[in-house]
Amino acid sequence: MSAKFRMGTDLAKYIQELGYRNELGYQTFLYSNDADIRKVFMFIVDKLPKETVEAQEETLGASILLQRAIASTLARQLSSPWAPSYLKENGITWRGIPPCWQREGASSLCHFHSCRITKPFRTGDITKKIPKELRFYYTKILPVVTNQTLQHNDTAPSVIEENAIEYTQQQEWESEWNQSGLGSRLSEEEYRARKKERIKKKITDQLRQDRQRGGTTAGSSLSLDLQQMISSISGRASTTTKTKGSRFTHTEKLLFAKDEEKVISEVGTGEGPRTKTEEELQKEREVEVGDLREELNNLVSRLESVDMDMRKFTAGIQQMEEEIGNQGRINKEKEEGFIVKKRTLDLLPDAENNITKLQAVVDNSGQRLINLANQWEKHRAPLIEQYRDLKDLTSKKESEAHKMLEEIKEFRKKMKEVADEARNKEELQKQLTSEYERMTKDVNRLAYTKRITEIVANIKKQKKEIDKVLVDTRAVQKEINQLSGKLDRQFTVTDELIFRDAKKDEAVKKAYRYLAALHENCELLIKTVEETGLIMREIRELEDQIESESHKKVLSNLEKISADFQQMKKENAAMLAKLKGKS
Amino acid sequence: MELGQCTLEGLALAGDAAHIPDKIFQPFITRACDGVLDVRSRDAIAKDSSFQSVDLAVLKEAYAAVVTLLLEAAKNDVDSNSISSVLEDCKFTSDRIDIFSKLYKDRKPYLQILLGRIGDSCPHIVDVDWRMDYYIKNNHLEKVNQAVYLITLKTEVPGQKDFKEVQFSCTQEQLQDLVGKLRDATKSMEKASQL
Amino acid sequence: MLLMFDDKQKTHLSFLLKVDIGVVQEFCRLSFEFLRKGSNPKVYQGAAQKLGVELESVQNGVEGLMYLFTESSKFMISEIDFQDSIMTLGFSEELRHSLLQMYMKNRNEVREILSEMSMDLPHYHNLEWRLDVELASRTLRHQTTPTVLLKLHTKENSKMSTQVLQTDPINLLHLTKVLEQALQEMKSPYCRRIVRNIK
């Protein structure tokens, strides 16, 4: 019960905070009546945010627009007159206002067929010179874009395809550069070169492996391996830029020329036994194939042995060269030793003198060494200092660069996001404008004004009627007044006349008395009638009041209230009991 | 609309008065449109003497870029406003943008006809001939006495100038059935058009 | 119109004069069955044994009946003409009556079999249609091109073939209109007169 009450008061508070003017409290919700609740709802519905409605329209917008476009095309086509096909150029007719084209035939259709086209690149850039030969090719030989394909029909597909290729390449490169290129901290060219190197190495490795395997195993497996490897390479190459791919396939072809021949011969023999038309020929072939295979094996083994020999020889050469170097070194050392020994032998005859001289020389050298060491120390200290400083600086710079890189990455991401958003917004704007153009703008207003004028006219009519009723009432009142005046006057005249006669005649006296009684009674009657009217009016008012009160469902509300009251009492009692139990 | 870097650079060349002077800008764009649309003028720009003042390599690059832009724009049904924003990015002056937009607006339907032509379709019915015979008898049966229609549908096949004819016969009841189904199709199309 | 029989046929059919009417009815039944499914020599043999006559005469009798029925069906011979034609064969009243009944009962079926044998052109069997709207293609991204796909089933000697065709709304309207006119043509006074006169 208390929860209900709290809920009601909260609701009332919120609604009043929203700016609801009329009287509002918990009772409005707990003991509701239609009119009040209706008012509250109207107010709340008015306050409902309108964006939700718009959003719904937006989501519907695109499909509705499409449907409308389809419907209008259909309507236009259905309403346009038929013409035999020889009156149409390529089956195209122009119909509708403004004229729109529509195709009514299929003879002009052609397949999407694109060829590679070449466009001059960076011819206007002065900073980067293009090679003279290329420029010559561009100016003199290369035909214009629209004249490069064999069929003119292929021009448009080729141009579109070229653009698509370029765009995808760019995107691919950008994503790769963002993912791994930026992190490697290489320049673009270096990155590309390194990647190229890596792929090249992979290919040569694989080629070598396959060749070694190919020598020992059968040809069919070799051809299978070959295919697998080519497909794996091409798969990988396709993720790199296209120009590279073509170069690879080229080198690949060159490298494989020999192997492929082998494969072809093998495949040819493989097909031999399948055709069982002329057995002799086949046998001959088999024999020949056997011979050839043997010869091949021989050749291969010879090749291998020769290869081995060659390797051995080269290894021998290297060893020999090393030995020669070693010997030369030993020779030099020995020569030096010989010179020293010879000098000392020369000095031997004048030993005393020479010893002192040598001593002096040694002393001098020691002195000089110390001097030099001192000097070295002097130079060294600042240099070391400088070295440390520089080291710090570089590390700082490095971390800064790292930060910048991160920032750049983020910026790129943001840039993309913003661009996407802008694109989306633009789409939306276009859609909305088209919808706005579609909307008939004045319909609503017109309807409203029409309704308002109608209402005003109605009110005027009602007013006229009320006026009429008022005039009627007034006329009736006037008549009443007149009649009562007349009655009054008549009565006084009669009264006087009879009064005068009454003195003379006893009968007249009686008549006078009757008259007075009659008058009195009549007045009483009139008063009663008036009173009845008043009461009737009151009754009617009361009835109205009763009706309005009964609309408010007082009785049921009262019942509800009393029930709630009972419940509250019970709850209170329970709480009291609890309290007592606790204390 | 998505354009490659190469095309954008080419467009910048086309918009640069130092490379393509103002005087020949309009003929230049017109030639590009014609070169795409018309077989006869596919090489016209190379033969036109009014472009002698321009370096041929630059001219070819700019031409390729303009052709690409025209085709891409028509492909994506881009309106003149969006195309002018692209051109603004390529540093076109407002005069040039106006010239370009106007030419593009005029030629767009033709470009779209050209692009719409690329595709495939089943044989396309363009006309129908009919002949009514009264089938009287044959070598096995006399007094057949029945109306027989011989119907020839003339269809166009992609890439062929001549009609391919589809011929079949039908009795009155069968024709009734055929017409009923065709009428059904027409009705439902009319319904779809009143959405 | 009367059917004419040459002497050989007459002698073949005269065999029927010698047997019971029940046997003739059985022969008739056989001849219709053979028309439907092709002849079966074993049946001839059985019948010949049962009747104690030569196989050849049974066969001739049945084949004669087959001829009689196919020829009269081919020309759509009326009741009276049929009776008159077989009158020359010297059949009894009762036999003629039962032959006539057989003929009338099976005439339509025999005509159907004959019409199946006659020359046939590829003729209309069924048509299915579907409304498509092309919304985008590789080279034109925003478009609304309505097309109507039609699948035409034709039949030639119980061999069905299908063709898929397409058209646009304008041509579809035209097609419908022209074929409606063709259909209407059948009700024109001229055509009616011809139909009435060729009977």
Image: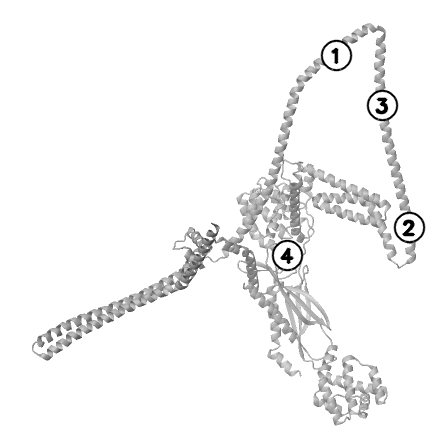
What residue is disc 4 on?
Answer: B117
The quadrant in which residue A199 appears is top right
Single out the mark in the foreground, 3 or 4: 3
Three-letter residue code for mark 4: Arg
Quote the CA–CA distance across marks 4 and 1.
98 Å
Q: Chain of mark 4?
A: B
- Whether labels 3 and 2 share one chain: yes
Asked whether disc 4 touches disc 1, contact meaning CB atoms under 8 Å apart, the reply is no
Of residues A520 and A180, the one nearer the viewer is A520
Classify mark 1: residues with Cα within 10 Å, few (<14), some (14-19) or many (20+): few
The answer to whether residue A30 is above or below residue B81 is below
The quadrant in which residue C72 appears is bottom right
Of residues A456 and C161, the one nearer the viewer is A456
What residue is disc 1 on?
Answer: A365
Asked whether disc 4 touches disc 2, contact meaning CB atoms under 8 Å apart, the reply is no
Quote the CA–CA distance across marks 3 and 2.
56 Å
Q: Position of residue A520 (x, y in %)?
A: 18, 72
Three-letter residue code for mark 3: Gly
The residue depicted at 16 percent of the width and 71 percent of the height is A488
- Label 3 residue SS: helix
- Label 4 residue SS: loop
Point out which mark residue A328 bears.
3
Classify mark 3: residues with Cα within 10 Å, few (<14), some (14-19) or many (20+): few
* Marked residue nearer the N-terminal end (1 or 3): 3
Three-letter residue code for mark 1: Ser
Single out the mark in the foreground, 3 or 2: 3
